[in-house]
């Protein structure tokens, strides 16, 4: 693990290393977006797992830049979101609140885990990140389907997965040397 940690630290110090990490992070985010369980109105994906992992491993600023690059590439037309969604439509549709939360969650995960990265702490930070994600997602979704249905379809089905993805991101970060 110490070798992985020093390699990541070295990569974060150079512009070329940072660019490589951003490209790798965008690839991870896209791959985790394509692993989905189609549900209505919000699909279940591994996006939040990847957002947390990128934040944990890259830190707040490189994690934020990576998530923004992923979303920027999507806005420009690359099919990098769940179901191959691309363009500006996902940023105004029913899942826009969740999408808007991704950069915030990446930064928050990176910031809160900067000094102490134990498994339990990372798991708790992951749950906090998911709470922010669900709050923003449900708030946006409620504007189109009402609060009760937004909670029923935009939060409740994701609570167990939220815990599992938080713990998996914590484990992934620990394995990456965090």
Image (tube, grey):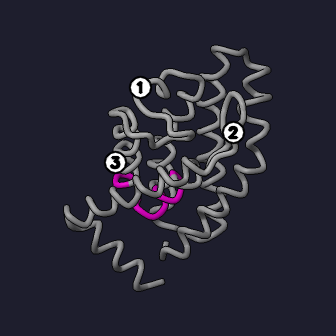
> Where is residue 123 drawn, in percent x and y?
65, 61
Question: Label 1: which residue?
Answer: 88
Marks 3/1 in contact by CB < 8 Å: the verdict is no
Instruction: Magenta stretch: give its range.
Output: 51-62
| Helix, strand or loop at mark 3 | helix
Query: Which quadrant of the view contains residue 11?
Result: bottom left
Query: Which quadrant of the view contains residue 147?
Result: top right
Q: CA distance from mark 2 to mark 1?
A: 20 Å
Dot 2 or dot 1: first in sequence order is: 2
> Where is residue 31 drawn, in percent x and y?
51, 54
Which residue shows up at 55% across the image and 73% down it? 174
* 146 to 132, vertically: above or below: above
| Helix, strand or loop at mark 1 | loop
> Where is residue 66 drawn, in percent x and y?
37, 50
Dot 3 or dot 1: first in sequence order is: 3
Q: Main secondary structure of the magenta part?
A: helix
For residue 52: magenta? yes
Mark 1 Cα within 10 Å, few/some/many (few <14, many 20+)? some
Left or right, 117 with reference to 78: right
Left or right, 135 with reference to 24: right
Question: Label 3: which residue?
Answer: 65
For residue 95: magenta? no
Nearer to me, 148 or 109? 148
Q: CA distance from mark 3 to mark 2?
A: 28 Å
Q: CA distance from mark 3 to mark 1?
A: 19 Å
Closer to the camera: disc 2 or disc 1?
2
* 162 to 40, vertically: above or below: below
Pick out the residue farthest to the left. Answer: 15
Question: Label 2: which residue?
Answer: 38
């Amino acid at each position: 693990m110490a070798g992985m940690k020093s390699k990541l630290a070295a990569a974060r110090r150079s512009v070329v290393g940072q660019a490589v990490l951003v490209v790798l992070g965008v690839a991870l985010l896209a791959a985790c977006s394509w692993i989905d369980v189609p549900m209505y109105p919000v699909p279940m994906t591994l996006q939040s797992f990847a957002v947390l992992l990128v934040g944990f491993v890259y830190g707040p600023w490189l994690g934020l830049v990576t998530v923004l690059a992923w979303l920027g590439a999507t806005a420009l037309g690359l099919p990098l979101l769940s179901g191959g969604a691309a363009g500006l439509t996902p940023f105004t549709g029913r899942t826009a609140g969740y999408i808007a939360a991704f950069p915030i969650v990446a930064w928050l995960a990176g910031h809160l885990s900067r000094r102490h990265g134990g498994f339990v702490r990372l798991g708790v930070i992951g749950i906090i990140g998911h709470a922010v994600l669900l709050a923003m997602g449900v708030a946006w979704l409620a504007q189109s389907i009402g609060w009760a249905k937004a909670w029923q379809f935009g939060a409740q089905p994701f609570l167990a997965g939220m815990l599992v993805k938080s713990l998996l991101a914590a484990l992934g970060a620990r394995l990456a040397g965090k």
